[in-house]
Image (spheres, rainbow, N blue to C red):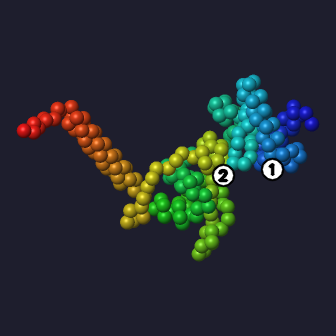
Amino acid sequence: MEIEKLKAIIEAILFACGREVKINELMSALELSGEDVLNIIESLKADYEMNNRGIEIIKVNDGFQLTTKKEYYEYIYPIFDKRSKPNLTNAALETLSIVAYNPKITRPEIEVIRGVNSDGTMYKLLEYNLIEAVGKADAPGRPTMYEVTPDFYRMFGFSNMEELPELPRYKLDENQQIVIDEIIEENKEQEEIKEEKNQEIDNNENNEETRGKVPRTKRTIK
């Protein structure tokens, strides 16, 4: 089958599904290897880019989805989507961050980290389809485990968990609360110690150089 027809088929599948399509689904539909499918998708993406199209193909975990470009959202939203726009409070963003960095986390574990009840926030994130249940934990009461959805990655412009920003180092105090200030202070102290050692080395080197320049007095043996 020629490449242009294969590109058209993949484009049609992505458009019709309206969701991320797993790479193995495309392999099965086209009876092609994963490498061939990826090459066709890259070619299709290049076509969109070259022609400055309003749509693009994005990678979501181990699948792909056909979407509109983010820069055209302000024109599309008023016409197409009449639903209420997700309004994420600070509590919701905090909870969402915890789930994003801790896949398969339970609600009790989230509440231990936040220190407050998170029922309402969790329900809202579930309603917005930003998190989802992924099974039961092997713990007393079998609490439900949660992780973020592909909608989360699309909303925030990530392909997978590996692209999330790196977290700062932290430790827990006696109340099991996250402490970052002490880490920062420790880093400052370590930098100061390093600077002092470097200064000491420089001083020693300068002293050595000075001693080398001072002529030594020769003793006369009588």
Q: Is residue 115 above or below residue 19?
A: below
Q: Describe residue 212's horizontal placement relative to residue 166 as left or right.
A: left
- Specify few, some or many for label 2: CA neighbours under 10 Å numbering under 14, 14-19, or 20 or more: some
The residue drawn where x is 64% and y is 47% is 160
Disc number at residue 149?
2
* Quadrant in which residue 1 is drawn: top right
Q: Report which residue position mark 1 lands on.
A: 24
Give residue 4's quadrant in the image.
top right
How many neighbours does mark 1 have within 10 angstroms: few (below 14), some (14-19), or many (20 or more)? Answer: some
Q: Is mark 2 on a helix, strand or loop?
A: loop
Look at the image and tell me in which quarter the C terminus lies: top left
Towards the viewer: 195 or 102 = 195
* Mark 1 secondary-structure assignment: helix
Dot 2 amino acid type: Thr
Q: Are marks 1 and 2 in contact (CB under 8 Å)?
A: no
Percent across and percent down for residue 179 are 40, 56
